[in-house]
Image (cartoon, helix red, strand yellow):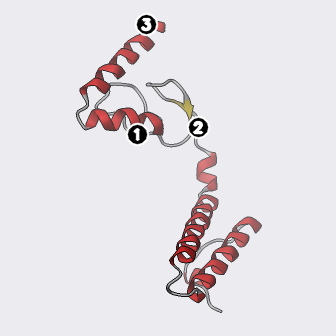
């Protein structure tokens, strides 16, 4: 059986990657053989395939993630790993964590003035501590 993975140049550099690719191919086979009206089963298989795909992507990029350094969010002052997020329009130095981006930066960008006032108070308090 020829798999879709053979057409792409994916390095099978570790036993874990080989195992993930086999699992994906197995799920793909089950999906193609499943009854077309069994939507719950199809959704379940699709979800599992997405999870395995995410694991494969992580394995492929593992080296890149290892070189990431820990950063500190300038708003909540908690450490986080990753690229971080653009804090605009909040005037802070550095990138913000995913939580602050979702619950503080986005609302401020959407024009929620109460959130913006709250953040400015937090930042003023943080500066006075230093």
Q: Which residue is mark 3?
A: 128
- Judged from the image, the secondary structure of the residue bearing numbered disc 1 is helix
Q: Which residue is mark 2?
A: 69
Q: Quadrant location of residue 18?
A: bottom right
Q: Residue at x 42, y 11 (%)?
A: 125
Up-down relation of residue 50 to residue 35 (above or below): above
Task: Nearest to the eye among marks 2 and 3: give it.
Answer: 3
Q: Which mark is residue 102?
A: 1
Q: Nearer the viewer, residue 11 or 111?
A: 111
The answer to whether marks 3 and 1 mark residues whose Cβ atoms lie closer than 8 Å is: no
Q: Residue at x 23, y 33 (%)?
A: 111
Up-down relation of residue 30 to residue 10 (above or below): below
Q: Earlier in the sequence, mark 2 or mark 3?
A: 2
Q: Earlier in the sequence, mark 3 or mark 1?
A: 1
Q: Position of residue 45 (x, y in %)?
A: 58, 74
Up-down relation of residue 18 to residue 63 (above or below): below
- Judged from the image, the secondary structure of the residue bearing numbered disc 3 is helix
Q: Quadrant location of residue 105?
A: top left
The answer to whether marks 2 and 3 mark residues whose Cβ atoms lie closer than 8 Å is: no
Q: Nearer the viewer, residue 62 or 99?
A: 99
- Judged from the image, the secondary structure of the residue bearing numbered disc 2 is loop
Q: How many angstroms separate mark 1 from mark 2 (CA)?
A: 21 Å
Up-down relation of residue 120 to residue 13 (above or below): above
């Amino acid at each position: 059986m020829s798999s879709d993975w053979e057409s792409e140049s994916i390095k099978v550099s570790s036993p874990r990657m080989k195992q993930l690719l086999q699992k994906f191919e197995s799920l793909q086979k089950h999906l193609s053989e499943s009854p077309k009206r069994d939507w719950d089963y199809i959704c379940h298989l699709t979800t599992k395939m997405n999870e395995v795909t995410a694991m494969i992507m992580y394995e492929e990029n593992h080296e890149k993630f290892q070189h990431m350094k820990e950063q500190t969010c300038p708003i909540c002052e908690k450490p986080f790993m990753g690229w971080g997020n653009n804090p605009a329009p909040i005037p802070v130095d550095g990138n913000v964590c995913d939580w602050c981006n979702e619950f503080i930066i986005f609302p401020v960008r959407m024009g929620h003035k109460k959130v913006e006032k709250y953040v400015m108070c937090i930042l003023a308090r943080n500066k006075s501590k230093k």
